[in-house]
Every structure is written in C-alpha cells, then in structure tokens.
Image (spheres, grey):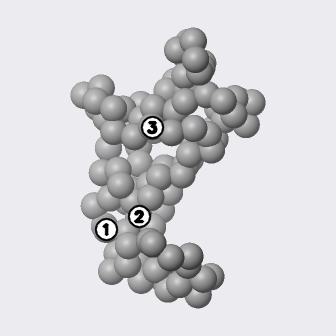
Amino acid sequence: FNVPLSSADVAAIYNADSAGKCQPTMGRLVVEAPQHPNAWIKILDPLGNLVYRGTPPLYTSCVLFCDITYTVKLIQDPTGQLLGLQQITVPCCPEVATVTFP
C-alpha cells in the first residue's frame, strides 16, 4: 500500500479472508531471532531456491505457497556462518506459521 492504513482498514482486509489481500493458496510466515538482530533470515523452497530473505523479526505477507515445507536459515552477518536451521510447513492465509530461533 502506498498510504498508511488505519486500524479499520487492516481489520477490513483481515476480515475479508481470502477475498482480501491474502489469497487462499498463499501463506505467511513470521521468523523471530531475538538474540540475533543483525543476522539474515533466508527462506528456501523444497528445491533449495531462495524465495524470501530479510532481517529479524521477519514478517512475510501472504507471498509463500501454503502447505509446502520451507527451510528457514539464520545466517550471521557479515561472516555467513549458519546460526540455525528449521523446517516448517506454512499454512494457508489467514493462518500464520512462526519460527523462533533462540
């Protein structure tokens, strides 16, 4: 969105379910790494392709295909050291999957 959304706007989108911003074949993921705020998060599809990346906390919108198991990697910046790895199956929107790295 190119403008700030009010709480009523957000509630309307959420309440619209699959008719709103989220599509029923798409899912979303939240990744938290409270002990590693300067790390990178990489989300890989089942074939190992990078599909999303960002810094923690990472909140994807409904951009991931749902009912697919993704690999979530926590990478130390700038060394590239792998700090953590988890696999998770992402549910369809409006549900959300959460990965937390200690």
The residue at which mark 2 appears reads as 93
Marking on residue 50: none
- Reading the image, the residue beneath label 1 is 23
Look at mark 3 in the image and give the residue it sits on.
Answer: 53
Q: Are marks 1 and 2 in contact (CB under 8 Å)?
A: yes
Residue type pointed to by label 3: Arg
The answer to whether residue 31 shows anywhere in this view is yes
Residue in the image at 45% along x and 72% along y: 2
Vertical relation: 94 (above or below) 47? below
Is residue 99 in view from this perspective? no
Task: Please tell me whether residue 21 is drawn above or below residue 36 in the rendered image.
Answer: below
| Res 45 → quadrant | top left
Task: Measure how far apart labels 1 and 2 are at the Cα level.
Answer: 7 Å
Q: CA distance from mark 1 to mark 3?
A: 21 Å
Q: Secondary structure at mark 3?
A: strand
Work out how far the residue at label 3 is from the one at label 2, CA to CA, in angstroms.
Answer: 20 Å
Outermost front residue: 2
Label 3 packing within 10 angstroms: few (<14), some (14-19), many (20+): some
Mark with earlier residue (1, 2): 1
Q: Position of residue 64 (x, y in %)?
A: 35, 50
